[in-house]
Amino acid sequence: MSLVRILLILIVCATTPPAQAKPNILIILTDDQGWGDLSASGNSHLATPNIDSLARDGATLDSFYVCAVCAPTRAEFLTGRYYPRTGVSGVTRGEGRLNPDETTIADVFKSEGYATGAFGKWHNGTQPPYHPNDRGFDEYYGFTSGHWSHYFDVPMDHNGERVRGEGFIVDDVTNKAVAFIEREAAAENPFFCYVPYNTPHSPMMIPDRWFQKFENFEPTLRHRDPDKEDLAMTRSALALCENIDWNVGRLLKALKSSGVANDTIVLFFSDNGPNSYRWNADMKGRKGSIDEGGVRSPFFIRWPNQIAPNTRIPQIAGAIDLLPTLTDLADVPLTPSPTKPIDGQSLRPLLIPQSTNAKWPERELYSVRRDEVSVRTQRFRLDAEGRLFDIPNDPGQRTDVAKDHPESAARLAELAKNHGEKMLAAFQANADRPFTVGFGETTQLPVRDAIAHGSIERSSKAPNNSFLHAWTNPDDYITWDIEVGEYGDYEAILYYTCAPENVGCELELSFQRGGSLRATIVEAFDPPLYDKGRERVENSHYFMKDFTPTSLGTIPLTKGRGLLKLSAAKMTGSEMVDVHSLILKKRDPKKD
C-alpha cells in the first residue's frame, strides 16, 4: 500500500466521529398521578422541580394518552399494543397478566446487550412465566400486585424471593434503582431501567416530613365539582407527589454523578388520571374514566444533545408509542411478529424532526373500558356515549358538537364500533386463564388469586394485597384454579397466622387431578396489624400484618388444569388459620 493511501486512511479515521454508543434508558412511571399533579402543569399548590426539569431540558407531549387504570397502561407500554390484545383485561384476580407469548420492551433491549432492571410496582403477573424476571428483566425489586396495603418496611419481591423492604416504599425502590444505575454505568454497560412507582395510589401513607407542609393546607385550585373533592385525599396526593419528585431528583443525580446523564434517555409519565376528584385543569373524568381527564397523562422526555430543550409537541400520542419510539431512538432492531403487530408508532419525527423528512400522519387513539370505546383525534374526542367534543377548545367536554360536525361524528362512531368489536373479541379470547404452577422452580399463589368458599372473609374489599381470615367453619375452604406445567412433587409452604388457642388445627391440601397432603399447625404466630398512624385518610380499607411460613409437606401434582383446594381437616379452636399465600416449590429428585 502506498504511503499516500495510508495517510488518506489515517486522515479519514481521524476526522470521522466514533459510532454513537447506544443510549441508556430510564423510564419513570407513577401510579394514579393526574395530569394536574405537577407544577409544570400549572398546579401552584406543590413544587415538582425535578420532574419539571425534564420538560425544561427536553420535550413535553401536550396530548399524551394512557389507559383508565393501572395494569392496562403497563401492558401497552411494555408491548406497544392495545392492552386487550395482550391478555390484560383489568387490575385484579389475574386480569393484569400479560400473555407469555407477548414480546416486551425489556425482551427487545435485553437481546441487544442491555442490562435490564425494574424497580417498583409490576402489576402484569406474579407466577412464572408472568413474573418480571421471565419478561426480560435481569433484576426485579418491588411487588407484583396491583397495590400494596402498607408503605413502610413491607415484604417485597427480589428476583422471586420474599425479602423485607427498608423504610418508605418509594424511597426504597429508588435506592435499588440508583444502585442498579451506578453499577451498570461503572461497568460501562448500556442499561434499561424501569421505575414504576406505586404512589400516589392509595393507601395515602406518607412520611411526616412530606405531609407536614400539606396537613392543614386549604387548596384554592379545586376540582371542577368541588363538592366531590375529598380534601384529605388532595392533601395526601400533593405530599406524595412532592416525595415522588424528590426521588426523581435522586435518579437524575445518579445519572449525573455516574457520568451518563448525557447518554441517557429519560421518560416520565403516569398510568391513568388522578385517583380522586382534585384539580385537573377542568378536564372531565378521573381514574377509571375514558374521558379526557381519566386517560390524559403528563409526559416528558429528555435526551441531551438530541432532543431540543423546551420542545412542545401538540400531536396526540400514547403509551402504545413508547416501544417503537425508544427502539427507534436507540437504534435497536424491532421486528414484530406478523400475528402480533405493533399498534403504536415511533415519535422520533416529532422529537427529533431534523432526523427525518417523514410527514406526521393524522391518526386516532382509542381508549377502551370493557365494551365502551372513546376515540381521540387531533381535534375531537368521541366519548363512549357517542357525543363529540372539540378538545382544544373544550377540554372539559361540556359542549357536544356532533350536530355541527356530523361527518366526523359518524366516521369516529364507525371506527369506535369496529375497534370495540376487535377488543371485545380479544377480551373473550383471554377470559379463561388458570394460574400457572411449575413453570418455574418456585410458584407463589397469593390469596388474591384464590376464591374463598363459605364464610371466610377478605381483609379488604380489593383482593390485590388482601389476606383471608375469619375461617370459623370447618366446612369452608379456599381454591385456586391452576394449570400445572410439569408433573412432580412440590413442597407446599403456607404463609399463615394462627392464634395460640387454634394451634393443633389440621389442613388438607388437595389437587383435583390427584394428589393430597395433610399438615398440622404446631406453632402459634399472631402478630398485630401494621400500624396505620401515617395513613392520612380516614376509614381506609387497607390492612396488612406479618405472616410466617410453614412447610405443609410434599404434594404430587399431575400436569394439567384443576382446582387446588385448601380445606380444614380438623379445627381445635374457634378458627382455622389466616392465609396470605401458598408457595409451591419443585422438588429435585437428584437432590432429595
Image (spheres, rainbow, N blue to C red):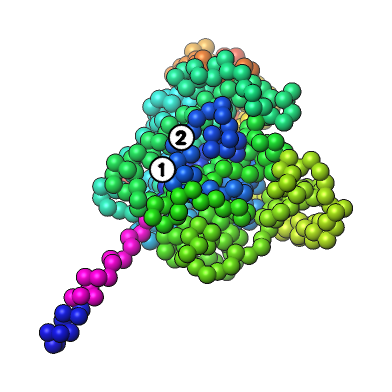
Q: Toward the viewer: 137 or 362?
A: 362
Q: Quadrant of the C terminus?
A: top left
Question: In percent of the image, x 24 and y 75: which residue is there?
Answer: 12
Does 559 lie within the magenta span? Answer: no
User: Mark 1: which amino acid?
Assistant: Tyr
Secondary structure category for the residue under label 2: helix
Which residue is located at x 27 percent, y 70 percent?
16
Tell which of 353 and 137 is nearer to you.
Answer: 353
Taking the image as shown, residue 351 lies to the left or right of residue 365, namely left
Label 1 Cα crowd, 10 Å radius (few <14 / some 14-19 / many 20+): many
Q: Position of residue 328 (x, y in %)?
A: 47, 62
Left or right side of 462 for 257: left
Q: Is label 1 in a helix, a strand or a loop?
A: strand
Residue 377 lies left or right of residue 206; in this view the side is right
Looking at the image, residue 187 sits to the left or right of residue 95; the answer is left
Q: Residues within 10 Å of mark 2 (few under 14, many from 20)?
A: some
| Residue at the limit of the structure toward the left, as seen here | 3
Discs 2/1, front: 2
Residue at the disc numbered 1: 140
Quarter residue 450 falls in = top right
- The image position of residue 428, as x and y in percent, is 71, 53
Q: Which residues are magenta?
A: 10-24
The residue drawn where x is 29% and y is 47% is 259
Q: Which residue is nearer to you in this view: 547 or 305? A: 305
Locate residue 467, reporting x and y percent: 56, 27
The residue indicated by pointer 2 is: 49
The N terminus: image quadrant: bottom left
Residue 21: say if magenta. Answer: yes
Q: Residue at x 35, y 38 (%)?
A: 253
